[in-house]
Image (spheres, rainbow, N blue to C red):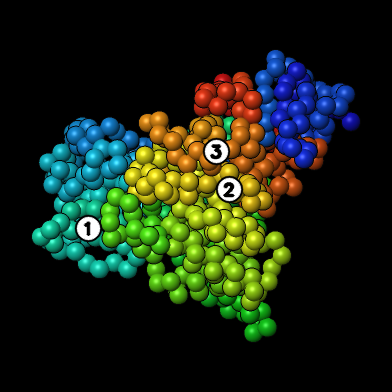
Amino acid sequence: MKADLLLTNARVRTLEGPGRDHVARSVAIWRDRVVAVDDDVAAHRVLDLDGAVVAPGFHDAHNHMAWFGQSLDELDLRLPSLEALYDAVAARARDLPPGAWVVGAGYDENKIGAHPDRDGLDRAAGGRRVWLRHTSGHMCVVSSALLDDLGLGDAAVEVPGGRVVVDGSGRPTGLLQEQAQHLVNDLVLPYPVAGLVDAIERAGQVYLSQGLTSVVEAGVGGGWIGRSPVEVAAYQEARARGRLPLRVELMVAADALRPLQGHADDDLGLGLDLGIRTGLGDDRLRLGPVKIFSDGSLIGHTCALTDEFADTPGEKGYLQDDADALRERILGAHRSGWRVAAHAIGDAAIDLVLDAYDEAQRRWPRADVRHRIEHFGVSRPDQVARAAALGVVPVPQGRFVGEIGDGMLRALGPERASWIYRYRSLLDAGIVAPASSDRPVVDGTPLKGIHDMVNRRTDSGQECGPEEAISGLEALTAYTLGSAHASHQEHEKGTIAPGKLADLVVLDDDPATVSPRVIRDIRVLRTFLGGEVVWEA
């Protein structure tokens, strides 16, 4: 048998072997699989890569694909000042037809000095409806017109798991935190499937250009993160029409689950109709874990900490629901066969989730379940050890250190800097750590994430827990094999070996050996998905 394609004259980072440091010279591909590495194989086509580096395709273990795709059409608020934000809102308002909303995303009050407020938005937009989402996704700011639509023009309402922020006189400022964002969502959701297909395709094309071949979509079908109750249908439609550019695993928002009915002997918990659960699908589109939110954002000061924020004495954040309700949700999902991916950033929230996972496994044991903690953002040393002992997979975001690290350092102070989005401690504890971006919260370019995992400096140059830095090879492994392992897919992808999917990225330099200072400058030359070139510089 001849291979379809032979990639030769390359530096192939297979990530196979005990040290993950094996380097080969060639890769042979037949159909969508690797069939040989460094073997003398005849092929119908030979591609000389002129010494370029070949690695497994990057795998983002936590991103928001449809949200990112939609944001590409919105006002980009990653701006240097509050004044610049108001100017951008004013410019967009002038270009819109009557009645249209000004919609934007990506602002960070840690960088621009303060949250925008309703009065500033009213002046900038001339009274239009304005909806601006924070870079964390855990809060938003709206103008007076939208507050009036919500019945919040003059007074706030209580929102369990959220907050309508008010000024000293009790008047809403326009800032809506956590579950209070649902108030605006009720005016705009659901988005149409056709629009979501467009967003998915737009996002996917960007991903391919950055070497991504697999992603986990971290929440569909409900909650403040979902775009539509039939969001899975949008991904299926995209695939059916050839508009799903890469491999996607979908987390289902816990809001979509309900008590299951069946035979009494089945002892069912929470799930989707027909008993659908984690694992349904194939290597192109499949259901992953159920997504459960336990707390909020570190830079937004809404995550649940055991000790107060360094820059806001007396504040410790809060859970997004009653602790017992969160525990029952986790137990119910585990009991009915789901893997669980619990969003937990603050160490108090991490304690709650670890307790629930421990209880779930004791009551309904399952082998190698690999429940996850999304973010694991402020983790104490004892929590790292406990996660390792329980077989729990933390899913941190290396790029957070660079892009929003200054705000995180202010929130926690220097004493807890090493607790922020750890990597070194996870690897030393024996955890197979994945890599992810949480895009569009930050720039999700994998090579920028790898850069920050290795350098542990904020974009302004501050050190951020340098003892948690890892090597370029370890970071590359996290963005490939580590993320595949977190999805129970290490038998299909994550390394370059015979029998595995031929999902590859071709780079102009090697993240494992290049100077740490220039990892983010490495260029993607080609991206292969299932043995086919799907992007080329």
Tag 2–tag 1 contact (CB < 8 Å) = no
Give above or below for 165 relative to 258: above
Whole-percent x, y for residue 529 in the image: 66, 35
| Count of picture labels | 3
SS label for mark 1? strand
Q: Is 198 situated left or right of 40 in this image?
A: left
Find disc 3 in the rendering and name its residue: 469
Secondary structure under tag 3 reads loop
Q: Which mark is residue 451?
A: none
Measured from the top left, where is residue 71 in percent x and y?
Answer: 38, 40
Q: Which mark is residue 425?
A: 2
Residue occupying the point 64% across, 70% down? 361
Marks 3/2: CA–CA distance: 9 Å
Q: Residues within 10 Å of mark 2 (few under 14, many from 20)?
A: some
- Labels 2 and 1: the sequence-earlier one: 1
Q: Amino acid at mark 1?
A: Val
Q: Position of residue 189 (x, y in %)?
A: 36, 56
